[in-house]
Amino acid sequence: MSNVPYLASPGNIIKAFAAIKTAATPPKVSQDFVKTKLGITGSSGDQMTTFLKRLGFASADGTPTDLYRGYRGVGGGRALATAIKSAYSALYQRNEYLHECDEKSLKEIVMQETGYAKDARPLGLTVSTLRNLISLADFSEPENSASSDDRYNDAAYSISPQAQINHDMVSKTKGENVSLNLGYTINLNLPETTDIEVFNAIFKSLRANLLSSSDD
């Protein structure tokens, strides 16, 4: 049975995560920071500090992680979605669309994973914690509407140095220069897009940098 993270006061999630957006990123996500800057006081603040670590927003020593900083940015909802999928990975193994489940389905999944009784208080708190987190997260797939330069970078074309080059011919005769002709294979991972300009730019770059003959 898994020990799934939950809060005794799940409603504090909305307040705390709104404050994370506005408060300056601290050197450490400490109890003082949570209670003073995030406004979660008392024992609830202590629990929230631990919860943020379990969620992956802070390391064991309290240092804010990339997920914490990412949540404060424009794509914050996606950073939180990543954190949820990691912290609740055991539940996602039971249903990869956990974030789309209704309350009844969530309860059933949590019960299966934790072994909680149907009327157990932690069951309701776990489900409520999850639903509050999910309400702030963005699980949608990123659109291919980035800038042209980003889309070109997404193509990620590369030539592997291992076993990609086939030696067609190597000839050497006494008193003559070495003649070396190489054949190579280029593997392209093209972005999913219908914008023909993206592909034109990729293949233009290939012709200019890799496929043109050299006089050297």
Image (cartoon, rainbow, N blue to C red):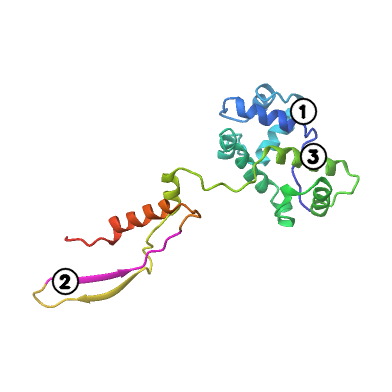
Q: Is residue 159 above or below residue 137?
A: below
Q: Which residue is mark 3?
A: 128
Sort mark 1 into few (<14), some (14-19) or many (20+) by Cα contacts within 10 Å: few
Sort mark 3 into few (<14), some (14-19) or many (20+) by Cα contacts within 10 Å: many
State which quadrant residue 11 falls in.
top right
Query: Label 2 sits on what residue type?
Result: Val
Q: Position of residue 191 (x, y in %)?
A: 48, 54
Q: Position of residue 79 (x, y in %)?
A: 60, 41
Q: Would you say residue 6 is visible in this rendering?
A: no
Q: Which residue is mark 1?
A: 43
Q: Is residue 105 above or below residue 47?
A: below
Q: CA distance from mark 1 to mark 2?
A: 78 Å
Q: Which residue is mark 2?
A: 178
Q: Earlier in the sequence, mark 3 or mark 1?
A: 1
Query: Label 3 sits on what residue type?
Result: Ser
Residue drawn at x 72%, y 38% as measured from the top left: 135
Residue 207 falls left or right of residue 176: right
